[in-house]
Amino acid sequence: MRPRSEVLVDLSALDHNLALMRSVLSPGTRLGAVVKADAYGMGAARVARRMAAAVDMLMVFGLDEAEVVHAAAPSTPLLALMPVHEIEPGSPAHGMLLRGLLHLALHDAAQLTALDRLAEALGVQVSVHLEIDSGLGRGGCLPAEATLLAGRLSGSRTLRLAGVFTHYANAGGSESGTDLQRGRFEAWVAGTRLPADCLVHTSSTYAAIRHERFHHQMVRVGLAWTGLAFDGTRDGKFLPAVRGLRPVFSWRSWIMQSRRLPTGATVGYGSRWVARAPSTVGLVPVGYADGYPLLPMDPRTLRPAQSERRQVRVRLGQGGDAAWVAVPVIGAVSMDQIAVDLTAVAERLLDGGLHAEVEIISSDPEAPNHAARVAALTGQHAYELMCRIPARVPRRAVAVEGAVRVPAVESVVARQAS
């Protein structure tokens, strides 16, 4: 049986994006890749294995993720970003520490004390990256406390200061705010005696693509490798090369039923869509339980807060004659299905579209159902959309380098207002 839907992970696009980001870095600047949350739902083992030869370090949140990624990329150093206090003796994480492949983010004095005891008990030296809170206010410690922690680390036999870093709060939207944080962090670095091999890093994707001055000794990219930073920063200041990033994922399904409805028929819970003429409606076996996002609701009316419509694309024809056409999603999203208006293209679809391929999320940045557009329309970030597609939707790795892409044809403008 075919799956109800599947996410396609384009490994060629992944290779391309990492090579592109490497090309914008100065010689000697390291490339780190963030693969937390199962590589944003794309499969951490699959993605890490592909990345291993292209990056200098992989970043995860917790030790459970680190162990999965290490199994796939056993020679690549890993940085766990959450405050880790305990590691079980004999665990894979313990083995990674013994090999010097697991680095831990250090957030505060209590964690430092815990790690000191841990390292003594495990018989290892733990490499830590001290996080300085320069303005995000989420984790790490303020500069004054960081100075005290750095002093404690300088005399430690069990803990090695392998890196210092910070996170920017608004690198995608505020150059001045990002520069302010950079200045605070760099002032702390300049006033602190650090080991010669201590790695200084500040930039996630938006800072990395904004300007070289944010690169320091390593960048940490997530949005860049997914290809979803292709449109740059919100204020329009970014390195031109990022225009070449390619989205790594798309989401496909198919029409499981096609029905002809009379004038006046309604579709979906709440009867929010009404046919103003005889209409062809297709059902697609994807719903909110699969991660398809709901529109923000107006609590006063229990109807969508805005009227802009989402679209999917339906494949017309086969082989060299195939093309994508955008059609509107209509009515309320159900747990396991959505309805689409096929009226304008029904005559060009066999059996009214039954079994026709449907592109839920497109990897084409120009498509109306590209991940960034769907996410923005539904009040999300593209990261959220990726992460919220549950494990019940299978992932399939593909490589489309040099493949013939299915062209898009004109979008179908809804002829019937709901």
Image (spheres, rainbow, N blue to C red):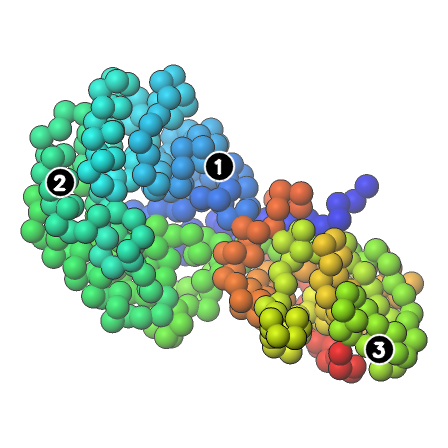
Q: Which x, y percent locates residue 306?
A: 61, 77
Real-space CA distance between mark 2 and mark 3, rounded to the nearest whole angstrom: 68 Å
**Is residue 246 rendered to the left or right of residue 351?**
left
Q: Is residue 347 visible?
A: no
Front residue of this view, candidates 319 and 103: 103
The residue lying at 67 percent from left, 46 percent from top is 393
Which secondary structure lies at badge 1? helix
What secondary structure is found at the residue carrying circle 2? helix
Q: CA distance from mark 1 to mark 2?
A: 34 Å
Task: Give neighbour class at mark 3: few <14, some 14-19, many 20+ (Cα, 10 Å).
Answer: many
Which quadrant of the structure image shows residue 347? bottom right
Residue 104: give x, y in percent of width and height: 30, 36
Pick the quarter of the image with the N terminus. top right
Residue at image mark 3:
275
Q: x, y percentage for residue 13?
A: 53, 53
Picture quadrant where residue 170 is located: bottom left
Mark number displayed over residue 49 = 1
User: Pointer 2: what residue?
Assistant: 150
